[in-house]
Image: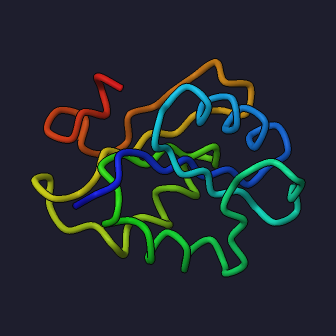
Amino acid sequence: MKKPLAIVAITKHGAEKARLMAAEFAGADLHISPKFKDDRPAIYYEEPLKELIARIFNDYLTLVFYVSLGAVVRLIAPVLRDKKTDPAVLVVDDAGKFVISVLSGHLGGANEM
């Protein structure tokens, strides 16, 4: 059974916004760059981001990235299957002002999220 939500952040501001978002969604897993490790709960990934995404992509219903859109497209491209099984993917800017539904907008619920 897929987990509801993974939030991935690679920048300092993105990590802070991601922490706020994770607090709003029960069951969300927060994946943060180890550069921003502190005593707050999160999953601090050690592998390259490309490997993290390949490992977790199919484990979640929704993935939210505080990562640039271009980087996300390149990261998810190798693991895409089809619109019926791929998770919803969203990109949020570091300021938390803009959200882009990248993948599975209708079937996966990205647009609704």
Residue at left offset 29%, top offset 22%: 112
Q: Position of residue 13 (x, y in %)?
A: 82, 37
Q: Position of residue 76 (x, y in %)?
A: 42, 64
The image quarter containing residue 31 is: bottom right
* 86, above or below 99, in the image: below
Residue at left offset 37%, top offset 75%: 78
Image side of residue 53 versus residue 40, left or right: left
The total number of labels drawn is 0
- Farthest residue in the top direction? 97
* 45, above or below 90, in the image: below
Residue at left offset 34%, top offset 64%: 59
Q: Quadrant of the N terminus?
A: bottom left
Q: Position of residue 81 (x, y in %)?
A: 19, 68
Residue at left offset 36%, top offset 26%: 113
Colour convention of the picture = rainbow
Image side of residue 14 versus residue 72, left or right: right
Q: Nearer the viewer, residue 70 or 105?
A: 105
Image side of residue 72 versus residue 93, left or right: left
Image side of residue 55 versus residue 80, left or right: right
Q: Nearer the viewer, residue 67 or 8?
A: 8
Q: Position of residue 68 (x, y in %)?
A: 63, 47
Q: Nearer the viewer, residue 34 or 103?
A: 34
* 34, above or below 13, in the image: below
